[in-house]
Amino acid sequence: MINATNANTMKEKNRRLVLDLIRKNEYSRADLAKETSLTKAAVSIIVDDLIKTGVVSEFKSAETGIGRRPLCLKLNPDSMYAVGINITRSSAEVGIIDISGRIVCKNKVDVYPKKEALKQIVECIASMVKENAIDTERIYGIGVTAPGPVDSLNTTILNPTNFDEWHYENIGLRLKKALKTEVYLENVSGGLALCEKYFGIAKELNDFLLLIVSDGIGSGIMSSGKLLRNATELGHTSIAYDGIPCECGNVGCIEKYASIPAMLKGTKYADWNAVIEAEDAEIIEKEAEYLSCAIVNAINLFGFDSIILEGEINYRPQAIIDAIEKRLKNNTITRTDTRIFSGSAFSGVLCAAVTVFDNYFKFE
Ligand SMILES: [Zn+2]
């Protein structure tokens, strides 16, 4: 299908492009023109409007040297807000964040019974907006994270295990109807990958795999700067064609071997921290062997330059990082320089809410 772009769409696209750059870095108007290939006049029209509406402000850069210090632009944190709802199997955390990643407020509600939970979520948002005197015009939407699998495009929670009451809940439709604003849905790993991109260590990274290793294994994939939606259950890719059967229907899923409970089964350790504190090289090497298997498959498919580790595995992670990196160098074919980083363990509310900003800036 050919997408026609009319003048208004183009105007809005350029506005968001400029705003996204200001969000990430200090830019003068001239630098923005250079970076976007827009004319200086076009940039000035956009910037003047952003200043007029209180979204950005100008300040003198701290640059030293000869000549005048140029005027740079910065995004006003209180100009853009997003609501985040992180639904887990035990509770739902509801909060509001600003564009700088600050959590303005948050609260917790029960997830059972579902009908009551949805009612409470809606009430909770309304009272937080009121208490914090947030201008609703500046709330850009609601982001939800929930246990996977989820259908992001249709904002529906699919059939996550041990969460039957919420199966096939179209949370997007439900909240949109109640709160009259756009709703976005991601699984937790996808939200966390976006958080690293917007507020964490992945600001400059465009192709990375985020791997959460805890009770299960979750994954978020950033490809060419965009989060892959509905396609990231690395925990259920197989590392053994005749391996352990999994609830998902497949056999040999990596989660059956490398999730923390699976790895610790039959050992003397109660949690991963204990393994690290005991410096148990045998278990660390075994975990690295399993994880590398799945990571190598992913790198050979996507050519990731970076892997970000999150979850319980991220406790004092240097030993496991070294053990995985050693294997990646020998076993990958498309590239051999992939680095492993330790992630930042962002709050669930932030991971949920950031999906709103990502949808805004990825406007097409
Ligand atoms: Zn599986």
Image (cartoon, rainbow, N blue to C red):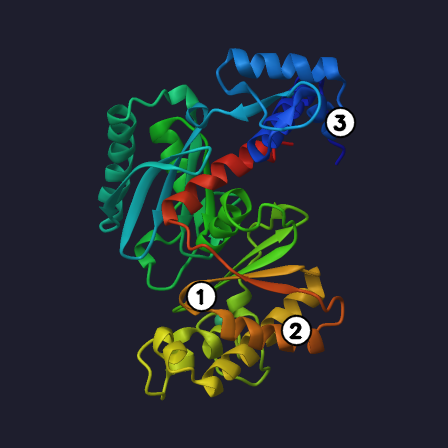
Quarter of the image for the N terminus: give it: top right
Dot 3: element:
helix
Q: CA distance from mark 2 to mark 3?
A: 38 Å
Q: Does label 1 point to a residue whose CB lies under 8 Å from ligand 1?
A: no
Tag 1: amino acid: Asn
Tag 2: amino acid: Leu
Q: Earlier in the sequence, mark 1 or mark 3?
A: 3
In front: label 2 or label 3: 3
x 70%, y 78%: residue: 330
Please tell me how crowded label 1 is: few (under 14), some (14-19), or many (20+) other residues with Cα within 10 Å: many
Q: Quadrant of residue 216?
A: bottom left
User: Which residue is under mark 3?
Assistant: 34
Determine contact: label 2, label 1, CB under 8 Å. no
Dot 2: element:
helix
Tag 3: amino acid: Lys
User: Which residue is under mark 2?
Assistant: 328
Is 86 or 308 nearer to us in this picture?
308
The numbered mark at residue 314 is 1
In the rendering, at what x and y percent does residue 177 appear?
A: 37, 30
Q: Does label 2 point to a residue whose CB lies under 8 Å from ligand 1?
A: no
The numbered mark at residue 9 is none
Q: Earlier in the sequence, mark 2 or mark 3?
A: 3
Is 49 or 258 nearer to us in this picture?
49
